[in-house]
Structure formats: C-alpha cells, structure tokens
Image (cartoon, rainbow, N blue to C red):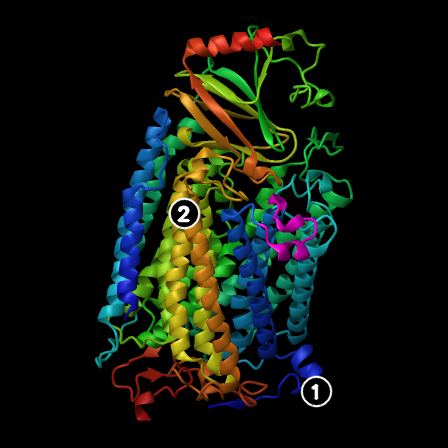
C-alpha cells in the first residue's frame, strides 16, 4: 500500500551538515529543544535569584558582586538588578522556552512524521529559522553584560519607560536596545517557522491523512503557526517603531510634554497606549502559542494511556480553531486599567469570557476521555493528568481577571502573576514534560527511567502548586507585582511569611529538576532500549524505527486508513488500530 | 493512582485558604467597595464550585479507571453532553461578566457629579503629588520648564497666573469623608498607577493623557497608595497615602496649607 518516493535531499555526510547546519527536521527539532533547555535553566536560575532577593533584600552575597560589579556592588542586589532579572526571566521564558520547545522543538520533530512526510516543506528555511532564533538568544543574553546594565522594563517593555533611553534609569540604555533588537530577530525567525509549519500541514499530508484524521498535536501546531504568523508580524512592526523612537528621534509611542530626570524631552505626539495595543495584539495570541501545543500533547498522551479514543475529536478541533480565532479578539483585557475607552473594555471582557468556553470544552473532553478508561500510569500520563489539573486551576482564576470590574483591584497584583504562571507557565511546561517522556524513546531509541520520572513528577506537581497558589492570596491582599522588596508598605510587611514560603517551595521545586536532567542525559546513553512502538500507540511516528532514519519512512509514503485515536475498538485483534493499518483490520 | 488523593488534598487545602480569609482584602470604605466584594464573592463561589467538581472528577477518573484488568469502553464522545456543557459554560461565564458590568459602569461610565471636589494628581519617578485649587476654585496655569521638585513646585506653577497663587500642593492625598472626589491624573515621565486597596480602585496614570477618576470615601482613616505600574528602579517604594478626614478637619487643613505658603 505504499508508493516509492525520491527524497528531496540526500542524507548528509559529515558532522557539520549532519548536526550543525542540518536540514533534517528531526535534528532541527532537537536543536530547538536544547536551545529551550538551556534557556529554561537560565530563566529558572533568574527566578530563584528574584525569590531570594524578595525575602532577603539586604543580604550580602559575594558572588553577586563578581557577576554584576555595578548592579550588585558589594554583593547587595540593587532594586534595578531585581527588575532586570525579572525582565530577563519573563522574556527568556516566554520567547525562548514557551514559544520554542512545544512548537519549534516537538513540532519540528514530529509534525512531518505524524502526517507521513519525509521533511518540512522548506528545509533550508527551517535551518535558517533555528539559527536566527539562536542569534536572537545570543543578543538577549548579551544584554545582561553591557554598559548601563540589563533592561528593566519588564517582558512587556511598555514605553515611555522602554522608549526614552538612559534618562529613564539604569538598564534603559544599550541593554534595552539589545532587548528590542533580540525580540525583532526572534520575530523574523518565528515568521519563517510559522510559514514552514503552515505549508507543511497543508501540502505534505500523506495519502488518506485527511484533516479530520490529523492527530490533535498536528492541529495545535497548525493553529499555533497561524497565530505566530499574524502575531509576530505585528510585534516585529511594533519593535521596529520602538527602536526608531529610541534611536531616530521619532515619537510613535512617546507623547509630548515629558520631563524625565529634570530634562524636557523633544518627543511630541506619540501614544503609549499604541504600543500596548500592538504588543498585546501579539501578546495574547502568544499565550495560546505557548499553551496550544501542550493541549495537543495532553490529548495525544491521555488517549494513548487511557486506551480510549479522544472524547469528542471534532469538538476538540473546533475548540482549537475557536481558541485561535477568539485569541485575536481579546487582547484588550490586558488593558482594562490602561486608560483606554471603558466601552471597549466591556466588549473585550465578553469576548474574553467567550474564549473560556472552548477551553472548558477541552477540559470536559479530557475528563470524558478518562471516563471508562483503562489508565496506564506512565510518567508521560502523569504529566498529562497534571496538565489538566493545572489548566483547570489556572483557567478559573482567569474568570476573575476577565471581568473589568474585578480587575479594578486585581490588575498588576500577584493574582495576575499566579494566574499566568499556572496556565501559561507550568501547565505549558507540564505539556513539555509529557511530550518529553512520551517521545523520548522515539527520539533517542531509549526509554527514560520511569521511577526517576515519577519522583520528579510528584515533587514538581506539589511544588508548583505550593509556589503559585499563594500568589492568589497575595493578590487578594493587594500585593503589587514587580516590587523588588516589601519593606516600604505597612500592608506588605504582613505578607512576608507567604513570600518566604513561596521562596522555599521554589528552591525545592527547582532542586528536583536536577533529577529530570540526570534522567534525560543518563537515559540517552544507558536507558533501556526502546522498541518501535513502546506505548502501543496509533499515530505514524510509531510505525518507524526508534530513532527514525533520515527520511523517516525509508523512501516509502505511508497510506492512512484510520483516525488517530482508535483504541480498544471492539472486535479488533489488539487494543489499538494504527493509522496505517489496512482498512479491514479484522481480516488480519 | 496516588495522584488522585494528592489532587483531592490540594483542592481542599487551596479552598480552605480562600474560605479562611487569612490573607484578604482590607474592609471596603464605600458603596462601590461593598458592590465589588459582592461581585468577587459571587465569582469566587461559582469558580469554587467548578474548581471543586472539575478537580474531584479528575481525581475520581484517575482512581476509578486505573488499569485493573477491565477493558476500556470504546466511545468517540457524546454530542448531547458536548452541547450541554458548551451552553452551560457559555451562559455561566457571560452571565457572570454581565452581573459585574454595573460596577464598571458606575466607576467609568456614569454621569460625573458636577459638584465633585477636583484634585489634580501628578505622578513622576518615584513620587505622587496632589494639587487643590484653593478658595477661587481654579487651578493655576503650569509650565513644564518651571517644574522643580526641590523648591516644592512639582507641578510647575507659574507666578504669572493669579489663579495659581492659592493652589495647594501636597505629597499626600487628603479628602473629606463622604464627598464625591474628581481626581484628575497626569504623569510627567512614564506610566504610573493610582491604587487604593480600600477603595477597590485602580487606574493607570499615562503621560500625555488626562484621566479623571471619580470616587467617594465614607470611612475616615489613612490608606496607603502603592504605585501599581512598573515605572523604573524605585517602583517598589513609590508610595503615598490617602487620608480621609471629617469635612471640618479637611477645611482646616486646607487653610493651614494656604497660610504656610
């Protein structure tokens, strides 16, 4: 049932073409994954330093002074250094972890295999997008070490603070410029990636792989790519305008009549709110860029280990599509307090509640998938189940924040920090862990250790709840976010024990990640050998050797005859029917 | 398997701390605050019920449908249930936001009280300043070039305008109890934010924009104002206070300020 094909390019010889400037989607996927792994280590370390500073603002730590001779003179972290750590933590996590690993990492590796293609549509573009992303990361990290200090305007970079240069304070010189340049480069890279993903899904599906037979992972990568194409284009434009405001004397975002550090500025006629509209037009879809692939992985993993078809496949597809569509209509809910028209706030809030509906559909369908199941508790499954729990928790706090009336108090408090860390931070990261444990055997031909995996899962699961739930209580008490310490307000002093608890929880949760890294690197070399289909799963990546050969299907195009999640079909010889099994399975 | 009881315990602990109100709002000091708290509680109860049942069901499915040798049921879903929970959540979520609309309208879209006492707020890195028009009821003209914080002229009041002679400038906000206030907010450098927890009110202060905020405080006392929009390295210490005083005390304070000029 297979037709022979000629591969678009031959298997490369030599280390450089094979592992460095590779055109192979699988190698590029792994490159992205490791870029994200490096970034998550940096981002996590920054968060630990922040949590340390919040409860010990005056502590003297000698190695701080070595790392940051001016910003931590004498080993005491300054408030501006805290804000820089926060800015870099947010930026690195959002762009270089949450955007890269689930989409560019796993997507690159598994999208072509799952749809029966031998590579992405544009292999050269694929290579370029990875190397451009790496340049963006280098520029971002360089911002740490430049004269004047790293940027401190937050990952949202609101002008005028980010737009008027060193007058606005430390970090607002070269550091801020590099930040914007890095983001602009990253936008370019993401646009290349998005075009490639869309073209691949539309054009390279194998025979029989109709849209309604796509694994849900492919649907989420598809919609994420569309979000990226529309979102990053706008952010790129906004970034260029902001660079011009900083260096060419334009005034897109800077109004007239400003007096900063006793100097009257020459800017005239710009609008700070314009940046916020452009930024959040990208920024809200970005939330879905981070979480949608995690939803796809969760669906895939839940169905596999529940040994049941996904509950409501079509409803899931429509939910993904409506999340993608509505995701572009809700950006204003980040701006309820910004000074924009109160009428538009009401429109944005109704649309925001509307986007809660497809999210709820997904949750119901996941629980529906588990109902009547025969659950195999693998580590991948544990993380997928953890994802559902965290998604519920993080989603429900959004019901508070989506109401402009309640935002009158909660805007820019820790309630917001708790909400988005739950949903776009840890839920998305649980999706990545689930993906890692599920696909590692395919990628490396060896199994990850399940015992280490489960210990890592349990501690991480309880740990993230311990870190991020108290943030909601802090928000209710009115604790503003982005404060480097809590010593200047009477009401904040009383909340210090909560902060202290969260810091301890963060230390513990970070420490247990060492176990994950040990498991990852140890198993690559010494893990149990993985068979072709260790999970008895149904999608096409499980029909090829682990790891797959260079052109995935050995020069053959698979033919698909079944939907993606045919588990426990009555009358079938095994409890799963693979997508490329013959039409009449019973005749086997 | 072990995951089921862990999810249940976490659910109960999380809900306990919401119910016990260990870390909570300060008491509200006006009608808006009471309405706000009511809307918050309504949302908390509804989301709390969903939270409990969703987490409980997840835990139950994990516990009940563990692999104990039974065969998994074969089902691709159920359109009836799909329709029921889609419409139920749509009605619930949109209904909830509509019940809160009244609060938003009262703050931002209702007819402003023409007799509200005007007070101007000027925010800068990293302090708030407040200005009262004085007995003539008029704010004097200001000039950016005249702004000087060290001589106590954060607004840049000009000598040339007689209306500015009696303007009172203060580093903290003083308001009379039970009177409508119109706070006219300006920033002269970056975006700041005015937030009083007890008022349940928050508003960005945006350079280049004049944003009015109407409110009334009915309980005397002193309340903290933390800047709530990232404005630079001193953000965490950008603080002022709002003192709600009896009307006679407020008038007396204004006279004293005028006399000290």
- Residue placed under numbered mark 1 in the picture: A14
Question: Which one is in front, A423 or A153?
Answer: A153
The Cα atoms of the two marked residues, 2 and 1, are separated by: 55 Å
Rendered position, A241 above or below A542: above
* Residue closest to the eye, B95 or A148: A148
Q: Residue B170 in the image: state x and y as whole percent.
A: 57, 19
Residue at the image position 65 percent from the left and 80 percent from the top: A19
The reply to whether residue A184 is in sight is no
Depth check: A302 or A315 in front?
A302
Q: Nearer the viewer, residue A547 or A282?
A: A547
Name the image quarter holding residue B144.
top right
What's drawn in magenta, residue-wise? Answer: A60-80
The reply, left or right, for residue A541 in relation to residue B133 is: left
Question: Residue tagged by mark 2?
Answer: A498
Q: Nearer the viewer, mark 2 or mark 1?
A: 2
Identify which residue is drawn at 64% across, 83% down. A8
The magenta stretch spans residue A71 = yes
In the rendered view, would you say A76 is above or below A447?
A: above
Give the farthest residue toward the right.
A248
Q: Residue at x 65, y 29 (%)?
A: B188
Q: In terms of sequence position, does the residue under pointer 2 or pointer 1 come before the other?
A: 1
Residue A168 in percent (x, y) is at 68, 39
> Which quadrant is home to the C terminus of chain B?
top right
Crowding at mark 1 (Cα within 10 Å: few <14, some 14-19, many 20+): few
Numbered tag placed on residue A113 in the rendering: none
């Amino acid at each position: 049932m297979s037709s022979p094909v000629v591969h678009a390019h031959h298997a490369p010889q030599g280390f450089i073409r094979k592992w460095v400037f590779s055109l192979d989607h699988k190698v590029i996927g792994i490159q992205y994954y490791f870029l994200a792994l490096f970034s998550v280590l940096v981002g996590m370390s920054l968060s630990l330093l922040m949590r340390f500073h919040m409860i010990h603002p005056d502590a003297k730590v000698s190695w701080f002074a070595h790392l940051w001779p001016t910003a931590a003179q004498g080993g005491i972290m300054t408030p501006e250094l805290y804000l820089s750590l926060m800015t870099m933590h947010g930026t690195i996590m959002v762009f270089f972890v949450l955007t890269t690993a689930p989409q560019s990492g796993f997507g690159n590796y598994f999208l072509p295999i799952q749809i029966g293609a031998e590579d992405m549509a544009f292999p050269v573009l694929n290579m370029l997008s990875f190397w451009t992303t790496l340049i963006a990361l280098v520029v971002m990290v360089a911002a740490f070490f430049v004269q004047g200090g790293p940027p401190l305007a937050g990952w949202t970079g609101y002008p005028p603070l980010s737009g008027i240069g060193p007058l606005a304070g430390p970090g607002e010189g070269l550091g801020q410029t590099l930040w914007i340049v890095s983001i602009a480069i990253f936008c370019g890279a993401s646009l290349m990636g998005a075009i490639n993903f869309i073209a691949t899904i539309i054009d390279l599906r194998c025979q029989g792989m109709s849209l309604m037979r796509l694994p849900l992972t492919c649907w989420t990568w598809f919609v994420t790519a569309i979000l990226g194409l529309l979102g990053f284009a706008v952010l790129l434009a906004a970034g260029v305008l902001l660079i011009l405001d900083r260096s060419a004397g334009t005034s897109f975002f800077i109004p007239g009549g400003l007096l900063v550090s006793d100097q009257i500025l020459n800017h005239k006629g710009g609008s700070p709110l314009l940046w916020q509209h452009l930024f959040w037009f990208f920024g809200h879809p970005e939330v879905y860029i981070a979480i949608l692939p995690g939803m796809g992985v969760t669906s895939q993993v839940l169905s596999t280990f529940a040994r049941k078809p996904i509950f409501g496949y079509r409803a899931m597809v429509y939910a993904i599509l409506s999340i993608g569509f509505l995701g572009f209509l809700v950006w204003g809910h980040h701006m309820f307090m910004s000074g924009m028209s109160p009428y538009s706030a009401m429109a944005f809030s109704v649309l925001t509640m509307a986007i809660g509906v497809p999210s709820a559909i997904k949750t119901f369908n996941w629980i529906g998938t588990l109902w009547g199941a025969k659950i195999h508790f693998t580590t991948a499954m544990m993380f997928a189940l953890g994802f559902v729990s965290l998604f519920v928790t993080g989603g429900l706090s959004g019901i508070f924040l989506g109401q402009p009336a309640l935002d009158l108090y909660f805007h820019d408090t820790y309630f917001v920090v708790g909400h988005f860390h739950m949903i776009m931070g840890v839920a998305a990261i649980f999706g990545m862990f689930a993906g890692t444990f599920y696909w590692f055997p395919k990628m490396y031909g060896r199994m990850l250790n399940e015992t280490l995996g489960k210990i890592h899962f349990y501690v991480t699961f309880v740990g993230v709840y311990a870190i991020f739930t108290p943030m909601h209580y802090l928000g209710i008490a009115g604790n503003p976010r982005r404060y480097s310490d809590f010593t200047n307000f009477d009401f904040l002093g009383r909340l210090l024990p909560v902060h202290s608890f969260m810091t301890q929880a963060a230390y513990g949760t970070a420490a247990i990640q060492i176990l994950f890294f040990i498991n990852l690197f140890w198993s690559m070399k010494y893990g149990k050998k993985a068979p072709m289909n260790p999970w008895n799963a149904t999608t096409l990546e499980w029909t090829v050797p682990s790891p797959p050969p260079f052109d995935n299907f050995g020069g053959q195009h698979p033919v698909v005859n079944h939907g993606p999640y045919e588990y426990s079909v009555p009358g079938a010889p095994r409890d799963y029917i693979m997508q490329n099994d013959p039409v009449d399975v019973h005749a086997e | 398997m072990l995951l089921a009881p862990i999810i249940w315990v976490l659910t109960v602990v999380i809900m306990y701390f919401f119910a016990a109100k260990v870390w909570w709002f300060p008491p509200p000091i006006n009608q808006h605050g009471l309405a706000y708290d009511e809307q918050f509680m309504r949302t908390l109860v509804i989301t709390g019920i969903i939270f409990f049942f969703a987490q409980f069901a997840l835990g139950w499915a994990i516990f009940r449908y563990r692999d104990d040798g039974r065969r998994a049921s074969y089902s691709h879903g159920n359109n009836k249930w799909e329709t029921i929970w889609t419409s139920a959540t749509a009605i619930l979520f949109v209904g909830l936001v509509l019940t809160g609309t009244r609060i938003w309208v009262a703050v931002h879209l209702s007819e402003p009280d023409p007799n509200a006492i005007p007070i101007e707020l000027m925010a800068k890195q990293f302090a708030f300043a407040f200005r009262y028009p004085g007995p003539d009821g008029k704010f004097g003209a200001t000039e950016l070039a005249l702004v000087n914080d060290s001589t106590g002229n954060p607004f840049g009041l000009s000598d040339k305008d007689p209306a500015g002679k009696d303007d009172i400038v203060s580093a903290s906000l003083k308001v009379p109890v039970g009177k409508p206030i119109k706070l006219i907010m300006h920033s002269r450098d970056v975006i700041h934010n005015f937030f009083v927890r007890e008022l349940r009110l928050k508003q960005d202060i945006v350079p280049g924009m004049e944003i009015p905020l109407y409110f009334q405080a009915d309980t005397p006392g002193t309340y903290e104002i933390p800047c709530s929009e990232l404005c630079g390295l001193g953000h965490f210490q950008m603080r002022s206070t709002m003192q709600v005083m009896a009307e006679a005390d407020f008038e007396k304070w204004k006279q004293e300020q005028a006399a000290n000029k």
